[in-house]
Image (cartoon, rainbow, N blue to C red):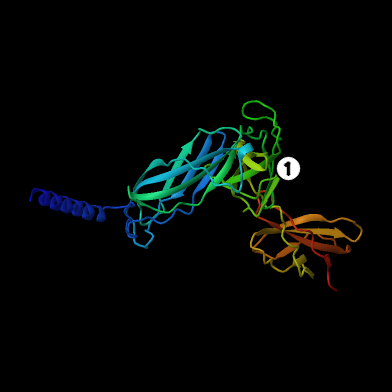
Amino acid sequence: MVTKTHVAGAILLTGTLFLAGACGYKTDPVPPDSIVPQAIEDLRYSVSEKGVTLTWTFPRETIKGTDLTDIATFDLYRAVVPLQDYCPTCPIPFSEAIQIAGGSVDPEENRQAIYKTALLRSGHKYFFKVSARTSWWAAGPDSNIISFVWHIPAKGPQDITAKAADSSAMISWQPVTKLMDGQDVAYPMLYQVQRSKDNTSFNTIGSSQATTKFKDSGLRNGVTYYYKVQSILVVDGNPVHGGFSESISIIAVDQTPPAPPSGVTVVQTAVGIKIFWNKSQEADVQGYRVYRRSVAEKTSKQIGDVSGIHTIFADSNVSADVRYYYSVTAYDQAEVPNESKQSQEAGVRH
């Protein structure tokens, strides 16, 4: 009897352990789609002589499309590869995630996250990706991957100048020959021009170039623009963004004159000679200038200035026995007015 009891107890215990093992987890629990954030798709970077700044937008929805109210943390992954060891086809050796605090999600605006680091090693290629979490077990998919090469950057361009032109500006600067640590530049150098209207928020214009001059066209005349230039060292085909020049301002100026007036007509009257012409259709015409020459003269001289709302001028200082020829120009509202060419000459009709 004793033996049978022990056997029955052993069978019962084994069955209990089997049942307990059957209901245990073999893998991590899978969170529902209603709490998993969407992937971050706009991970960006900006490199300067001070290091790198990463920015991205808070996800506003889950992968199921429901609204999010809060991001618990962001997982930021980094990989560092020496340039001489870099293999384009090899897996990227990301390290363990750096935990970055999240926060509430703004339903009206795209809230931006930011991460800065100056812990960079010269001659290395860096990779970053990021994902969002709503809890310790609900992590979203990885973002896009960004990469750049860090090298001791070049100093910013010096002696930047700007020359105003009609609806444009010509920006010039001196070539950069030194790195931040004083070493001579031993790699190809490019330059990137940036523009601003408030001297605070600058945007890249055009593409990076090797020349030290840049023409910015399509500007609005009379508006103040600010410019600065960043040096870019090209290390083994990889851009290394360096220092900035000082900013410089310019006001684009109107240098395009109006078209010459048409329809100039000259009529003899009892009190002198009257000159008529067609009103200019250009909106910025400020006035007209009337020119005259006698038949014996080769060049004409200005004899009148008329407001842009009038198209008639009376010349009373004439001699009855002299034949005169008249022409008219239009000028605009620029600070230094641009004057058109003279119209076709016209004489008194008999």
The three-letter amino acid code for the residue at tag 1 is: Thr
Picture residue at 32% right of the left edge, 59% below the top:
32
What residue is disc 1 on?
211
- List x then y, in percent, for residue 217: 67, 52
Q: Is residue 246 visible?
A: no
Q: Nearer the viewer, residue 76 or 167?
A: 76
Q: Is residue 73 visible?
A: yes
Q: Nearer the viewer, residue 2 or 44?
A: 2
Picture residue at 76% right of the left edge, 68% below the top:
262
- List x then y, in percent, for residue 142: 45, 51
Specify whether 71 is left or right of 306.
Answer: left
Vertical order, 345 against 339 (above or below):
below
Vertical order, 343 against 181 (above or below):
below
Picture residue at 22% right of the left edge, 53% below the top:
20
Residue located farthest toward the right when viewing the structure as drawn = 296
Q: Nearer the viewer, residue 287 or 325?
A: 287
